[in-house]
Image (cartoon, rainbow, N blue to C red):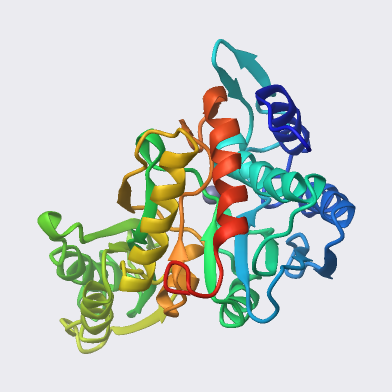
Amino acid sequence: MRELTTDGLLDAVRAWVEIESPTNDAAGVNRVADHAESLLRGIGATIDRTPGRDGFGDILIGRVPGEVNGPGLLLLGHMDTVHQRGTFGYRVAGDRAYGPGIYDMKGGNAMAVAALQHLHATGKRPRLPVSVMMIPDEEVGSPSSRAAIEAEALKHRAVLVVEPSGEGGKFTVARHGIARWHLRTEGRPAHAGAYHAEGRSAVREMAHHILALEALTDHPRSFFVNIGIVQGGTHENMVPAECRAICYALVPTVTEQTELRDAVHALEHHDPDVTTTVTEGLGRPPFGKTPAIQALYDHAAMLAVETGLPSAGERVAGGGSDGNFTGALGVPTLDGLGVIGGGPHTREEYVELRCLVPRTRLLARLFETLGPGVAGL
Ligand SMILES: [Zn+2]
């Protein structure tokens, strides 16, 4: 890609989007991986592809050499989308392009690879080696790839995530975390009419737990605790012997994450004959802005101005991404470097066509300039 043009980039984006890849469709995700692999091979990247497990697609890493050897940049993207096949198709209307995953986040993946292709085609190299890592299961919390992401992050100087930007192009410098806990109470069944006194209600005990946990919610702190699923009892004429619930919480910092964990473990016994078991579910640790992230942000913001983008701005994002894992490990992570658009996880997902050239140029400039002595690296 010698010249970066809107039409050329739109074709590149379209190619990613037209390969449908809901998370639970490993074959579809692997076709995206095939596509990414062939693009990366085309610019001389070394390919490292790990077969998928637990029903998910493969993890793909394309390693692009830099001018300087040693630890480089980890570029993170995910290949899966939340849209089942055939839900809606790619289309362009006015100054927007729509399609499944176009905003979250195939547009970002396409731009990142196009930026590397652009450097390659113009006889340039990234300053540092770049590992382009494509994840198959981000939309369900990256259960099959978290360990690999963390291991790669620790081998790199910094992580760039091409998840969509915030409103107007803002970069993401911190993300709230997500915590999930599975609760189960077990009591004793009894005929609710004839032998009520002998029963021990698991639902009643769970009701106490729900109130205790939801009471932690603190809106001004952006700390939300939601018991979104409760299942208990088998018959209205029986004292319920079992109840299950899932507690899902947005935890802005480790303080809230710890607060919730402590509360879950300290749940009070109201009925001594009912047992409660708690298990931690899939989550994403929060990551906060560090001086190293500030330095990365400052550098990217300067390049953004240079490429003609309106001053980028920064944001703390509510939702999670794979950047949560790397940021929480202390590896400098700049997220939200992908497209400008909107409507994530809806049929109206779109990208703004006018962002494609400047945002791709921004990525190319980041690859070209980030190196020892720059942005704290
Ligand atoms: Zn995403």
Viewer-nearest residue: 56 or 270: 56
Q: Residue furthest bottom?
A: 272
Q: Is residue 377 left or right of residue 199?
A: right
Q: Split into 4 quadrants, where in the image is the N terminus?
A: top right
- Looking at the image, which residue is at 34% across and 39% down? 311
Viewer-nearest residue: 246 or 207: 246
Indicate the position of residue 233 as horizontal and vertical percent values.
38, 63
Can I make out residue 355 in this image? yes
Q: Residue furthest top?
A: 94
Displayed quadrant of residue 297: bottom left
- Looking at the image, which residue is at 47% across and 68% down? 374
Indicate the position of residue 61 as horizontal and vertical percent values.
75, 66
Can I make out residue 247 in this image? no
Viewer-nearest residue: 221 or 163: 163
Q: Is residue 149 above or below residue 88?
A: below
Viewer-nearest residue: 206 or 310: 310
Indicate the position of residue 294 as horizontal and vertical percent values.
33, 64
- Looking at the image, which residue is at 20% across and 77% down? 197
Q: Is residue 377 left or right of residue 259?
A: right
- Looking at the image, which residue is at 61% across and 82% down? 155
Q: Is residue 184 above or below residue 79?
A: below
Q: Is residue 66 above or below residue 348?
A: below
Indicate the position of residue 75 as horizontal and vertical percent values.
61, 61
